[in-house]
Amino acid sequence: MKTYLSHSVEETKQIAKDLATTLKGGETLLLEGDLGAGKTHFAKGLAEGLGIDELVTSPTFTLHNIYEGGRLTLNHFDFYRVDNPEDVEMLGLTDYFSTPDGVAAIEWSANVKSLLPRHTRTVTITCGQGGECDNMRKITIDD
């Protein structure tokens, strides 16, 4: 387990970019943290680290965004609005959780816990001083 302190969006993205250089494909990353903690910014850094030039946005309403054109494909999920994991399964989204030529980054994974692959890595982002996210974040990455 590795822990980092980030004092800005750019530092958060750099930590993710560094992680992206170690990914080989087939990984599922669970991005954990409160609303506004920086999960989508972390996903943006992953995309940059994979060599993806597309604008990365939160898939809160689409549930899944696919970003191609880099060393690996990034499958970015946001399950904040999901109440029933079976809906995700019926849409076929679980097929993208661990593709050999891609990486999955899943926000709000607790809402689909029963569908997750056995082997995942968790990235936990917590706000710094007094729970305020404007000054510092602690980012913990499981091995």
Image (cartoon, helix red, strand yellow):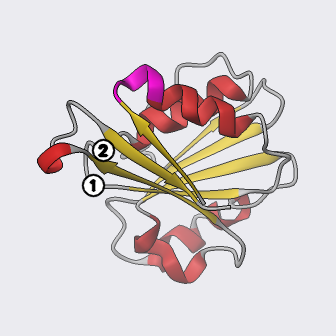
User: Label 1 neighbourhood size at 10 Å, few (<14), some (14-19), many (20+)?
Assistant: some
> In which image quadrant can residue 134 be found?
top left
Residue for point 34% across, 28% down: 7
Image quadrant where residue 58 sits: top left
Q: CA distance from mark 1 to mark 2?
A: 5 Å
User: Measuring 15% from the left and 42% from the top, which residue is drawn there?
Assistant: 132
Q: Magenta segment: does it hold 8? A: yes
In percent of the image, x 72 and y 63: which residue is there? 95
| Labels 1 & 2 near each other (Cβ < 8 A) | yes
Helix, strand or loop for the magenta stretch, by majority: helix
- Give the image location of residue 15, x and y in percent: 56, 33
Q: Which residues are magenta?
A: 7-11
Q: Amino acid at mark 2?
A: Ala
Check the image and report above or below for 99 versus 127: below
Q: Let me know if residue 52 is in the magenta part.
A: no
Residue extending furthest top?
A: 53
Residue 58 in sight in this render? no
The residue singled out by tag 2 in the image is 37
Q: Which residue is mark 1?
A: 34
Is residue 19 shown left or right of residue 4? right
- Is 38 drawn above or below residue 100 in the view shown? above
Left or right, residue 127 beside residue 61:
left
Residue 56, label in figure: none
Residue 119 visible within the image:
yes
> In front: 109, or 139?
139
Looking at the rendered structure, the kind of residue marked 1 is Asp
User: The N terminus lies in which quarter of the figure?
Assistant: bottom right
The percent position of residue 123, horizontal first and vertical second, equals 52, 55
Estimate the x, y position of residue 81 in percent, counting from the top left: 31, 60
